[in-house]
Image (cartoon, rainbow, N blue to C red):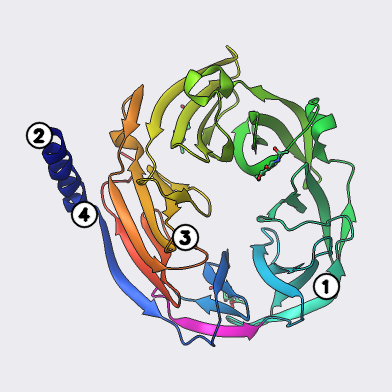
Amino acid sequence: MAIILTLTILSIAYSQKKTAICDIEQYFEFDQNENILDHTTINQTDIMLTNSNIYLLDENLLVLNSIKTPGSQDYECNRVTTHPLHLIFFLACQSQQQGGNPILYAYKANGLNKYELFGDAIYLPSIKEKFDKMTIVGNSLLIPLSDKILTFTTVISSTSWYLKTTSYTMDAQFLNVPTLNITSFDIYSYVKDVQTNFRILISDFENGVYWIEAILKSNNIVPYNSGKINVKNFYFLNSAKFRSVVILNATDSSTLFVLQTYGDGSFMFENSFTSSQIYFYSTLNKYKDWNPISSIRNNQNAILIPYQNYQKVVVINLFNIRSLKENELMVEPNDLLISASIDDLILYFISGNRLVFRSDVDALTRCTLMNYQEE
Ligand SMILES: *[C@@H]1O[C@H](CO)[C@@H](O)[C@H](O)[C@H]1NC(C)=O
Ligand SMILES: *[C@@H]1O[C@H](CO)[C@@H](O)[C@H](O)[C@H]1NC(C)=O
Ligand SMILES: *[C@@H]1O[C@H](CO)[C@@H](O)[C@H](O)[C@H]1NC(C)=O
């Protein structure tokens, strides 16, 4: 009884810290069955993608403009990503049929808060499965599939664009392992000897984490080295299955990362490349027995890990890196953000300590994180 009482008091104490202050909840006039699916930022403007529209939002979450997505039966346009070197974003529409190829559309800026379809739609015959993420680094488009990360080169002229396949596929052969079952990947740039380098981490369902080193050559990503991080050496990860990995920091000699498991919590590690050692920091507890959903985000000292229950309610656990101590086995979140019942979450930062998350089927909420800033 005493233990239960203490736990109750503790959990009240947590919710009273209130270091996440939410000031705007914006409802949108959606069509029936309109569902928020993805987000990107272009020219400092946020883009919210739904299954029927692309909305441009200002920092108060007001709609500046909207564009209907190309409708087509059997296809769902569900991913957007911005080209870092052009005022262009790409929309991926994925076949709802097994084995169908995705289609990519490009939208190009044409005046203040105006974007228009640009060039031709492009089929990607080399992709026969649905993907969750696409990202552009330099001129390279990276798309992770279950057994490889494909890289394409985006070639953009003033009137058209196309994709060139490259020989830089990050697969089992490149990693020198028998099989791969990729559940997520993350990429982080750091500067070494005035050159920009990239560290890529891949989470594998069974085997944990692989690392890849890459550089840019004429703005194309070129992976040149790889290896395995032996997270399975930790007894508590022996039988774990790995869902995602996110890089918090990387230098030439080390990587700080969070590894999420399916059944248990998430684990913060630092891998040293000079000593080939891995150090365990903390276990970031999951929310009750809820299931992980969407992906982990981080910004400055905040780590955000979303969970969902069977009623589809989402709770986002917020951890403050500054409050973590080394070798902590069970860390409870510093804050919680709670949504209504939703299918897909979007969650993004609009500045160092301001974030936006989907708080209802047709609503976004903006919050400010206090005390998470860098010292
Ligand atoms: C991008 O931002 C600049 C500067 O604010 C602005 O002049 C330009 O119109 C913007 N472009 C679009 C497409 O919004
Ligand atoms: C591969 O990973 C998925 C999760 O992304 C999992 O459901 C599936 O069982 C895994 N396949 C194998 C053969 O382990
Ligand atoms: C990353 O780590 C380096 C070396 O420890 C440190 O100097 C730097 O401030 C860190 N960067 C971030 C964003 O935490």
Q: Image point 73% across, 35% down: which residue? A: 214
Query: Disc 1 vs disc 3: which is toward the camera?
Result: 3
- In the picture, the quarter occupied by the C terminus is top left
Q: Which mark is residue 347?
A: 3
Where is residue 110? Give x, y as percent.
Answer: 68, 81
What's under tag 4, amino acid-wise?
A: Lys
Q: Residue at x 70, y 59 (%)?
A: 85
Range shown magenta: 59-68
Mark in front: 4 vs 2 = 2
Ligand number 1: quarter of image: bottom right
* Precedes in sequence: disc 1 or disc 3: 1
On screen, residue 6 versus residue 293, left or right, reads: left
| Other residues around mark 2 within 10 Å, as few (<14) / some (14–19) / many (≥20) | few
Sequence order check, earlier mark of 4 and 2: 2
Numbered disc 1: secondary structure: loop
Mark 1 Cα within 10 Å, few/some/many (few <14, many 20+)?
A: few
- Displayed quadrant of residue 206: top right
Q: Closer to the camera, 64 or 96?
A: 96
Q: For the residues carrying marks 2 and 1, which lies nearer the camera in this image?
A: 2
From the top left corner, tell me how far across and down residue 309 is, in percent: 42, 56
Residue beneath disc 1: 158
Q: Nearer the viewer, mark 4 or mark 1?
A: 4
Q: Secondary structure at mark 3?
A: strand
Q: What residue is at 58 percent from the left and 75 percent from the top?
A: 50
